[in-house]
Image (tube, rainbow, N blue to C red):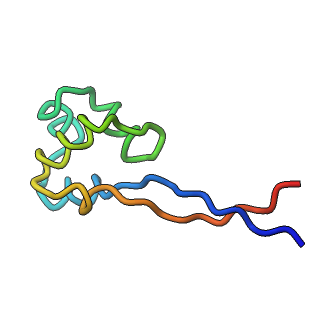
């Protein structure tokens, strides 16, 4: 019997906190020194930010690291 594999997925709540602060991706991008596309890619889990960028985002959103970024366990099918 094969066990299901668990994978840690690095996720974020940037979109939620941006909405609360009523700031756009472009505004957040300007605050942290990256492009709007970079913020969009991070929000959509297509790009993992550096530690420096992640912390700058937290400062800009006025939230702790743990409030913005977290790991989620996802089950994947057994490998053959």
User: Which quarter of the picture shows residue 71?
Assistant: bottom left
- Above or below residue 46? Residue 21 is below
Q: Give left or right: position of 79 versus 70.
A: right
Give the image location of residue 27, x and y in percent: 15, 37
The furthest residue to the bottom: 1
Identity of the residue drawn at 21% across and 58% down: 17
Give the image location of residue 54, x and y in percent: 26, 42
Q: Between 58 and 46, which is closer to the camera in this rendering?
A: 58
Give the image location of residue 4, x and y in percent: 75, 67
Quadrant containing the N terminus in the rendered view: bottom right
User: Which quarter of the picture shows residue 70?
Assistant: bottom left
- Above or below residue 43? Residue 74 is below
Quadrant containing the C terminus in the rendered view: bottom right
Identity of the residue drawn at 48% across and 40% down: 46
Q: Between 1 and 58, which is closer to the camera in this rendering?
A: 1
Q: Give left or right: position of 75 versus 26.
A: right
Identity of the residue drawn at 35% across and 37% down: 49
Identity of the residue drawn at 15% across and 30% down: 30
The mark total stands at 0
Give the image location of residue 12, x and y in percent: 35, 55
- Above or below residue 67? Residue 24 is above
């Amino acid at each position: 019997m094969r066990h299901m594999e668990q994978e840690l997925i690095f996720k974020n709540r940037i979109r939620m906190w941006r909405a609360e602060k009523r700031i756009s991706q472009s505004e957040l991008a300007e605050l942290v020194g990256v492009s709007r596309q970079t913020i969009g890619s991070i929000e959509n889990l297509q790009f993992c930010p550096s530690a420096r960028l992640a912390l700058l985002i937290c400062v800009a959103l006025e939230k702790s690291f743990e409030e913005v970024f977290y790991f989620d366990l996802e089950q994947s099918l057994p490998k053959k």
